């Protein structure tokens, strides 16, 4: 994963730098070193050429370089990032909604906590079974799409409300919407991590709850 922190690092400037290269006749000249737009004091990762939506050269640990050197595909890594981001956005709602609005009005939820970290262990077996089956079906359908050679990361044909024809009817609008989703997903992954630790330590997600 390119990293969830990229959403918070919106640097776009390229820091000047140089390296010395030999020339004919023993004369040396300074050649520019391309720096990361996100972290100007680091070199730009060679695998991140800016062609992917949301790529600002943020990869301080060199994951993308290692993946490409081992013959991996960055499209699959982007697919994983998008899936984690989407799940984190749903999880963010799951942390906040029950405490603010209560539980859904069904019998089996009566003994389930509004704390999501506790509630996951209190779900009835029937509900838990349905959850696992639903996840398996969804992942099976996704797997049948993402391993195709021409698959686009994150595009699974899921648009039940028809937002794409209405709001993404040009390539520019689609690219902008993909960037917004990516940034929201990255922020959500950071937020969920904060929710988890704060809820574990303090018992509440202050100041929201």
Image (tube, grey):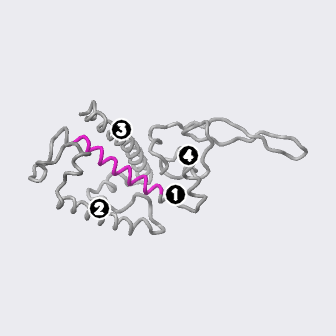
Q: Which mark is residue 113?
A: none
| In this picture, residue 135 sits left or right of residue 79 | left
Residue on which the image places disc 3? 194
- Spatial separation of the CA atoms under disc 1 and disc 3: 27 Å
- Direction right: furthest residue: 25
Quadrant of the drawing holding the C terminus: top left
- Spatial separation of the CA atoms under disc 2 and disc 3: 25 Å
Q: Earlier in the sequence, mark 4 or mark 1?
A: 4
- Spatial separation of the CA atoms under disc 4 and disc 3: 22 Å
**Dots 2, 4 in contact, CB < 8 A:** no
The percent position of residue 180, horizontal first and vertical second, equals 40, 45
**Dots 1, 2 in contact, CB < 8 A:** no
Residue on which the image places disc 2? 135
| In this picture, residue 200 sits left or right of residue 69 | left
- Spatial separation of the CA atoms under disc 4 and disc 1: 15 Å
Residue on which the image places disc 1? 74
Q: Secondary structure at mark 4?
A: loop
Q: Residue at x 26, y 62 (%)?
A: 132
Q: Residues within 10 Å of mark 1 (few under 14, many from 20)?
A: some
């Amino acid at each position: 994963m390119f990293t969830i922190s990229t959403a918070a690092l919106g640097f776009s400037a390229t820091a000047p730098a140089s390296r010395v290269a030999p020339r004919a006749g023993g004369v040396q000249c300074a050649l520019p070193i391309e720096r990361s737009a996100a972290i100007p004091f680091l070199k730009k990762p060679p695998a991140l050429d800016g062609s992917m939506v949301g790529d600002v050269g943020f990869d301080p640990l060199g994951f993308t370089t290692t993946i490409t050197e081992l013959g991996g595909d960055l499209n699959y890594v982007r697919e994983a990032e998008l899936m984690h981001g989407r799940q984190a956005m749903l999880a963010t709602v799951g942390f906040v909604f029950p405490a603010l609005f209560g539980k859904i009005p069904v019998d089996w939820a009566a003994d389930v906590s509004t704390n999501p970290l506790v509630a996951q262990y209190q779900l009835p077996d029937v509900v838990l079974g349905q959850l696992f089956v639903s996840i398996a079906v969804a992942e099976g359908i996704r797997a049948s799409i993402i391993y195709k050679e021409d698959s686009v990361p994150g595009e699974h044909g899921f648009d039940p409300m028809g937002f794409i024809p209405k709001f993404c009817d040009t390539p520019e609008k689609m690219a902008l919407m993909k960037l917004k989703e990516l940034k929201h997903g990255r922020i959500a992954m950071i937020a969920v991590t904060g929710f988890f630790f704060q809820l574990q330590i303090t018992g509440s997600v202050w100041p929201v709850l």
